[in-house]
Amino acid sequence: MKQQQCLQSQNSLPVDVAIKIVSCLEVSDVCSLGSCSSFWRDICDSNIVWKSLCKERWPTLDLHSVPSSSQGESLDLDQPKESNSKGWKEFYVEKHGGIKRKMASLGECLSCCPIKVEIYLKALEDMKSMQLAFKDIQMLFLKPEINVLFNLIGLHYCIRHLGVQVDTLKEVISSRRIQERQISVEWCKQGGWMHRFRLPNELHFHCVHLGDLTTPGGEEVLEVLDRGITLEVMRVQICTAVCPNEHGCHLSFD
């Protein structure tokens, strides 16, 4: 009886209202809702829903790169979907899968200890070449269960390459509870000359929270990482602060 009432309720729900409901959900929730009934499956698998999800995740998406079969936005619940046609859902899944595969390779580079500064900077360039959007960084990098160095490079990318507003970043890392995670950055600057004598090298050390990187005080650390090794800076290294139940990792930038 309850099942019949549920089906009647679904049938009486206008399609445009159902689409608006689904459009407010995250991708995982859309997939879960689509498994509830044939009505919701047709709604949740529709091009109009998945085009919206694609545009939300990749705002700069080039529509010309999308398969022509994905361009349609009409929703006909009575029209069966051809098994060999690719829509926006398939496009989303394939693009997400491609990013995940590239990120696995990137993760291997960042997990090596020690790691040189050119590898760190190359990782940032690889992220830029993949045209990762802010949504990608949130999903893959700004999580508490992964190594803090991945949090670091995700924040670095958002600040330098995406230009995400500081207030937005603060809100995200606070909601993800990673703002108190710590890293220590150390760099050695070559001593100058005085009266034909070389002065001692200068050793700089900063222990910062990830939240500090969204403040003016964290700008110096980001600038050191941006520059890497120069004629003036001889060595740069990053260490993760060792917390309970968390293994520290040491990155050496030579």
Image (cartoon, rainbow, N blue to C red):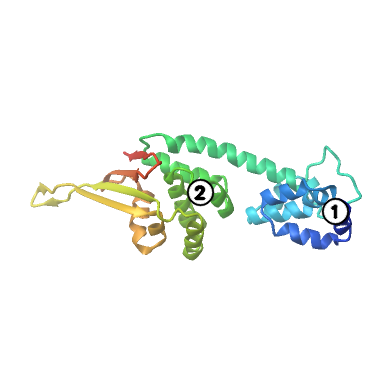
Given the image, on which type of amino acid does mark 2 rest?
A: Lys
Which corner quadrant of the image does residue 246 belong to? top left
In the displayed structure, does residue 209 sit left or right of residue 56?
left
Residue 58 visible in the displayed image:
no
Q: Which residue is mark 1?
A: 2
Q: Secondary structure at mark 1?
A: helix
Q: Earlier in the sequence, mark 2 or mark 1?
A: 1
Q: Give x and y (percent) for residue 76.
A: 88, 53
Given the image, on which type of amino acid does mark 1 rest?
A: Lys
**On residue 138, which mark appears?**
none
Q: Give x and y (percent) for residue 180.
A: 40, 55
In three-dimensional space, the C-alpha distance between marks 2 and 1, rounded to whole angstroms, equals 40 Å
Q: Give x and y (percent) for residue 209.
A: 37, 54
Q: Which residue is mark 2?
A: 143
Q: Give x and y (percent) for residue 201.
A: 18, 47
What residue is at 81 percent from the left and 52 percent from the top? 43
Residue 18 visible in the displayed image:
yes
In the displayed structure, does residue 36 sit left or right of residue 128?
right
In the rendered view, tell whether residue 144 sits above or below residue 109.
Answer: below
What residue is at 49 percent from the left and 60 percent from the top? 169
What residue is at 46 percent from the left and 55 percent from the top? 160
Q: Nearer the viewer, mark 2 or mark 1?
A: 1
Which corner quadrant of the image does residue 254 belong to? top left
In the rendered view, tell whether residue 62 sits above or below residue 13.
Answer: above
Which corner quadrant of the image does residue 134 belong to? bottom right
| Residue found at the far front of this picture | 1
